[in-house]
Amino acid sequence: MVKVPLTTDASYIIRQLPAPTAFIDTNYNIVQTSDKWTSIFNENEDYASSKSLFAVFPNLSNKWKLVLNNCFKGNPQPMGIHQTIDSNGKEIWFEWVNTPWYDTHENIIGAIIQLSNITEAVNNELELNKKNLFLQQQAEITKIGRWEFNIADNQLYWCSTTKAIHGVSKDFEPNIESAIFYYKEGHSRNTISMALYEAQNNGKSWSNLKLQIVTANGKTKWVMAGGKPIFNKGVIVGLIGTFQDIHEQVIADIKTIDNEKLLRTLIDNLPVNVYVKDTESKKVLANKAECEYLGVNDPKDILGKTDFELYAYEAAVKSRKEDVMVMKTLQPVIGKETVKKTLDGKETSFLSSKIPLLNSKGIAYGIVGISLDITTLKEKEKELRNIINIASVQNKKLLNFAHIVSHNLRSHSANFSMLLSFLESEKDEDEKKNIVDMLSKASNNLLETLGNLNQVVSINTNTNIAVKKINLYDKVTEACQNLSALISISSCEIENNIPVNFILKSVPAYLDSILTNFISNAVKYRHPDRKSHIILDVEKKGGYSILTIKDNGLGIDLEKYGDKLFGMYKTFHNHKDARGIGLYLTKNQIDAMSGKVEVSSVVEQGTEFKIFFNEKN
């Protein structure tokens, strides 16, 4: 029972009360307040008296009037919690309590209201609610649940997210045994069982265990489990942990890995070099063909390296310039024929393409390179061109040969026909004998012509000629011995500058014919006003053994006869032994061995022949 007389001394005491306090009469009017109340709600003490509590605090619930009426009847009750704004505009929360106010005659004349500031408690509760709400929302978004296990009472708690992941209802009550049973039998169940054992017995935490569970509806799901022990005074009293649904992520990762394996298998088995470079032209991917070309077994040996570390400098400069152009212009290079040279000197022809790699903003962050090795194709192309050239030459020879056959045999046939006609009509025996002699000579000439033609056919149709290594010095010596009578009669000087151990590749019979024809021609067509001098030299150059036969004879007018020099039955001097068959045969023999002949000559000064013997094939 509180009795407070309304005296000046009492008012002074009320003002000094430590708690915000207000005295109200039975009409709910504020009669007296403490300084604490005044400092909170009104610095000018407007609420000191003569104002209704509900006028001062219009947001108070009308139910509070019932509470105050009961207080006026001697039955005080808590008025509850109220939020208001203090004189500084700050939000504050109070818990209101009341007690009857008695006068000196113990009559209830009103109520005494005291406030307890619970703003901090309310704010803490609000913050806690916010955090709980945030955790709940985060759990729903990330699919991360929580669980707790109390060892003392063997109680396991699952949050709603954890229950949802397991596919159980919200009122499901788990236990540690059933929780383990949800893990898929085998690796997953054994792993979580061992983790729980180590945590309870050795205090070890576990995290990021990627395991599988079988949900309540029988669905297999990937989860991420983590947990740690809780200690109280050094004793393990429980476990807490997280439980995350990562099924979609794992399935996506598995698909990504499968796609990467499929893509890797594809590019590694393509019969082309495939690589990817970054903006600095460093390799970030290389397939099997590219590794084999660069002579490495593991792509790691070339990843991160630039062309300057893998190719010759000039090739690297050219490649880098091309990379920059593709990334700058965003224009791909497609099917460009290039030649690359590695650091060990190996040259390879490629049909290369470079395509810019673009990010989401359309900016190049590298290039994809695709190179097809066409070295073999280029070699085949070269061979094909050679074959076409040979076929063209052979075709010309065939036409020339057909012309020769047609012309020569027709001449012989006409000569025979004419002589036979003369023979039939001739009466004189002596004249008939002369005609028979002419027929005999014509027959011998025909046989000789057929022999020459047969020899030409033999050279051009013999595809299995055997090329051997031959000592050239010995062959020249042998040829000179065979021509010794002609050389001696002509007083010709032969200067053999060929090394005694010089070896070249040739068909032996063809080499004999070539040496005999060129040396005998040099002797036959010597200059009558000076002693004949023939010089033979040899050198190896550009895959050929080059035999030079030089004389100081009559020479040949190449401007006049150059294109007919190696024609059949073509002669360029009025020499009685000139038949025009030797050079033709030797030229065919040289061509048959993939060689060639070059000639230079000055009339009245001499001639020089260079015979190229192919050493490559």
Image (tube, rainbow, N blue to C red):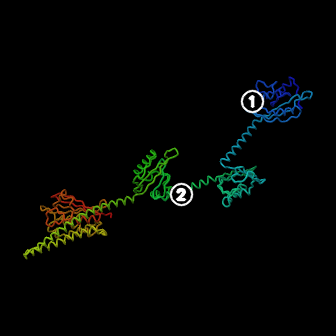
Could you say where residue 525 lies in the image, as x and y percent from the top left? Answer: 16, 63
278 or 332: nearer the viewer: 332
Q: At 74% across and 31% down in the image, what residue appears?
A: 85
Task: Look at label 1 and name its amino acid.
Answer: Asp
Specify whether residue 27 is in view: yes
Could you say where residue 293 lies in the image, as x and y percent from the top left? Answer: 44, 58
Task: Look at label 2 and name its amino acid.
Answer: Leu
Could you say where residue 443 lies in the image, as x and y percent from the top left? Answer: 16, 73
- Considering every residue shown, the one lying at the far front of the view is 425
**Residues under labels 1 and 2: Cα distance?**
71 Å
Q: Are marks 1 and 2 in contact (CB under 8 Å)?
A: no
Q: Quadrant of residue 43?
A: top right
Q: Quadrant of residue 497?
A: bottom left
- Considering every residue shown, the one lying at the far bottom of the view is 429
166 or 131: nearer the viewer: 166
How busy is the neighbourhood of tag 1: few (under 14 within 10 Å), some, or many (20 plus)? Answer: some
Q: Is residue 469 left or right of residue 287?
A: left
Q: Mark 2 — residue?
A: 262
Q: Is residue 76 left or right of residue 447?
A: right
Specify whether residue 236 is in view: no
In the structure shown, which secondary structural element does the residue marked by tag 1 occupy? loop
How busy is the neighbourhood of tag 2: few (under 14 within 10 Å), some, or many (20 plus)? Answer: few
Q: Quadrant of residue 448?
A: bottom left
In the structure shown, which secondary structural element does the residue marked by tag 2 occupy? helix
Could you say where residue 57 lies in the image, as x and y percent from the top left? Answer: 78, 29
- State which quarter of the image contains the N terminus: top right
532 or 579: nearer the viewer: 579
Label 1 or label 2, whichever lies nearer to me, is: 2
347 or 94: nearer the viewer: 94
The disc label shown at residue 86, or none = 1
